[in-house]
Amino acid sequence: MNTVTPRVFIAATRQNEGKTTTSLGLLAALRDVYPRVGYIKPVGQRFVEIEEQKIDEDTVLMDRVYRLNCPLLDMSPIAVEPDFTRKYLQQSNNEALVKKIQKAFDRVAWEKDFVVCEGSGHAGVGSVFDLSNAQVAGILKSKVIIVTSGGIGKPIDEVCLNNALFEREGVEVIGVILNKVHADRLDYVTEFARRGLKRKGLELLGVVPHQRILSNPTLDLIGEDLKAVRLNSSICGHNLVNRVVVGAMSAQNAIGYFKRGVLVITPGDREDLIFAVAAKGCESSEPLAGLVLTGNVRPSPSVMAVIQQMPFPVLWAAEDSYEVASSVHNLIVKTRPADTEKISLIRDIIANNVNVNRILESL
């Protein structure tokens, strides 16, 4: 396997801590140093099907944003399907999986100056089929950066726990990036987290401030999660939702909540609220993000005529308002290729808050 091309493995203390955000921003920053940067996610658990191949969705994101000029199947060699673990435990094929990862890395690294490797959770994820993140980093002969949520005590505790597993596999952790740190605690967390990590022999490589926009879902993402039907032809599916309002009050009282970025959720037979949304929510100064009609109650033809004129997406879901609101609240928001505003922000915050030069020196 190629051991010459520089590489770094992005791990985390748990899922959804910011590995993909870090990888996305780091790829942009590294391109200022290396003209040809590659990417691989050796083991993926969330995938889409492209030309009958299962490709990790983060791999698709990186390829579409950066045009990496490498086969998707090599950047995402192993997709953990629902029955993957059962099949592995019935008939272990670890050697074949290891060779698959190594050959995929060789093709990804071909004619590249640097490769970013992204993990799939904490250091132990994948242990059940002998491909934990710690083991995969060892297979790739890569040093590691651990990403964790902002704070001091809990994040450092979790970093130490993960670091122990990397050390057991003979893998060096070069440092830590704290993500999602609230702006008013940035200096405080930076100072004391650096002290705490230094006592454990680890370096603080960056502190990334919390950006609420990165956690805000789009109407398209909400529609997909709810398996909802679009009732109008608005092209604003990329509208970001920064607040949810459940229409369980009178239209007169609800109007005060109809502001920019609000998603209104209300039963499909609440015609008073739908007309209120049409009257207030369409104002150019305070445009709503969208409207979800619930309870599998389809609006009447006269209401549908109004809905067709609304400039934001209107969705129709089978579940009741409580279930819909709960689904939106619990939705895991992943950055998508079409999220241009988010991607631009990610590039800036990583470039401005992560010490890329120090990372390169450590490698």
Image: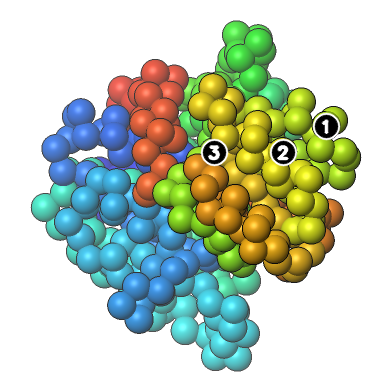
Residue 111 position in % (x across, y down): 11, 52
Q: How many marks?
A: 3
Q: Which residue is mark 3?
A: 240
* Crowd tier of the residue under label 3, counting other residues whose Cα lies within 10 Å: few below 14, some 14–19, many 20 or above: many
The reply to whether callout 3 and callout 2 are in contact (CB within 8 Å) is no
Viewer-proximal residue among 109 and 28: 28
Is residue 171 rendered to the left or right of residue 224?
A: left
- Distance (Cα) linking label 1 and label 3: 25 Å
* Crowd tier of the residue under label 2, counting other residues whose Cα lies within 10 Å: few below 14, some 14–19, many 20 or above: some
Helix or strand or loop: what does disc 1 sit on?
Answer: helix
Q: Amino acid at mark 3?
A: Leu
> Along the polypeptide, which appears first: circle 1 or circle 2?
1
Q: Residue at x 54, y 22 (%)?
A: 285
- Above/below status of 74 relative to 83: above
Q: Which residue is mark 2?
A: 276
Q: Which residue is mark 1?
A: 252
Q: Amino acid at mark 1?
A: Gln
Viewer-proximal residue among 80 and 228: 228
Residue 130 seen in the figure = yes
Helix or strand or loop: what does disc 3 sit on?
Answer: loop
Is residue 361 rendered to the left or right of residue 213?
A: left
